[in-house]
Image (cartoon, rainbow, N blue to C red):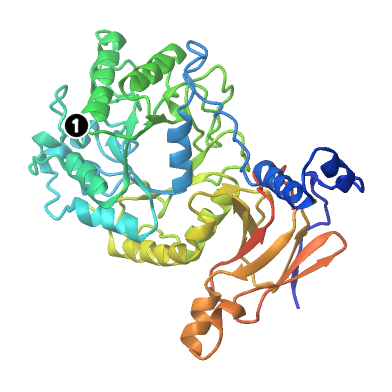
Amino acid sequence: MERINQKNQKNVTKGVTFGVTNGRHEWASRFGVTFRNFALLLLLLLLSSCSLPPTLPLPPGGAGEANPELRTNAAALEKWQDMRFGMFVHWGPVALKGTEIGWSRGREIPFNTYDSLYMQFNPVNFDANEWISIAKEAGMKYFVITSKHHDGFSIFHSDYTEYDIANTPIKRDLMKEMQLACEDQGIMFSTYYSVLDWYHPHYTTRYRNEPRPIEDSNMDIYKQFLFDQVGELITKYNTNLIWFDGQWEASWTHEMGMELYQYCRDLNDDLIINNRVDKGFKGMAGMTDSIAKYAGDYGTPEQRIGGFNNTYPWESCITICKQWAWKPDDQLKSVQECIHTLIKTIGGDGNLLLNVGPMPDGRIEERQVEVLREIGAWVKTNEAGIYGSRGGPYMPTEELACTYNGKNLYLFVMGDSREIVVPALEGVKIRKARLIGDAHRDASRDASRDASRDAWVKIVEEEGNWVFVLPDELPSDVANVIEVRTNSYLAEIEPVEL
């Protein structure tokens, strides 16, 4: 029998032992307290000291060094972290060509041709309710749309440009329809916005040797345009999160980033803002170089799973295909790869923002939808270990990841092993462990069996390890989840490397 043998390592968290001395009767008599009342008082004391979950520290992010008192809104951040899984959408007129959004301007597509695509953009099959239903069925709790990418096209009705969806053949405010669909279906509406703009005449950086002169460009004018548009996202579209991008070019400064963060929070203090609003984002690993210096609420690893980090919030953004925008016959990731990506991300204490690229007619490609539906079926079965969870205390490996929620521990098994071995957590006692989904499988196979009893997993303690023994037949061919019920809140346990 194959075994995942995670190295024997005892955890650092100590249990607390409570006891009553042999003189308890003498003490109770002296103070006029019966032993029964004394025991009751002691029980209440124990419950008050042990039953409350630990208080989590304030989030580390915020407005940066210009306003160190303005910290990340802790309640809004926790709500977003609890969601764990969201849909990213990169979409615009470039879908007509099937090339990458923004980056193919002046590369695969001549500048003038790219900039004229909006005049042909007529996604007559677009249905916002269908998009959001697909996201919801996939188990996603929030939705992020590219309101304006590096190419400068605004997919919303903006009062500050004519290069927007209002001036396309479709004319409808598609982003407002997305917002309302999200609100109707209980999905958190959010927007992507690039601070760089290779189309705007007053943005002072040109991409790929674009021939337009920059001598007459005025970054102050562009900055006002940017702030006005971001204000529209907040006040007209009620965005709950802004996913900024494009901060790496020299035209955008650290001071501008801190000012923009402050402006957004002034308009809506509950807003969550990623770290690409400022210059602290370092490479595709996505984490902020100095949290105290730079503005932003969370890190943004791109096209990779972030490393374990339970002190600074983060979110990996990863495509379901190769390209961000739609591309015909693009290489599609498997259901297993997507689910394992989600597992390793939440096991590292991050969120996953999985990107789809809709087609030019407004539909999401059916093969992408099929993958999303299969992901959603798995998520629905195992949601107890996903939503509201935090990563750890066991750090993810290729075959095992872990989350916790309160006193419950969730082990995500991505391999074929039937024995899962992890270091026992000192001071923590296991009450029960069950294989999520097993009861449903057993009940459907034989209604006469006690399915709930069959779902419990055998646990063996040996040499400082916990060994979870799984049945030969598992509920899922992709990944299985063991729910471990313990006697302790797990938030304060230090991470354990496996």
In the image, residue 160 sits, relative to residue 45, either above or below, namely above
Q: Is residue 462 visible?
A: yes
For the point 27% across and 28% down, which residue is it? 234
Asked whether, in this view, residue 92 is left or right of residue 260, the answer is left
The answer to whether 491 appears left or right of 93 in the picture is right
| 275 is higher (above) or lower (below) than 401 | above
Q: Which residue is mark 1?
A: 112
| Residue located 23% across and 27% down the image | 235
Could you tell me residue 439's position as x and y percent?
53, 77
Classify residue 59 as left or right of residue 487. left
Please, what secondary structure does the residue beneath circle 1 have? helix
Q: Is residue 77 above or below residue 462?
A: above
In the depicted structure, whether residue 483 falls above or below residue 281: below
Number of numbered markers: 1
| Residue that extends furthest to the right in the rendered view of this protein | 22
The amino acid beneath tag 1 is Asn
Q: How far from the left and from the top, in percent, is residue 83? A: 44, 47
* One can see residue 363 in this view: no
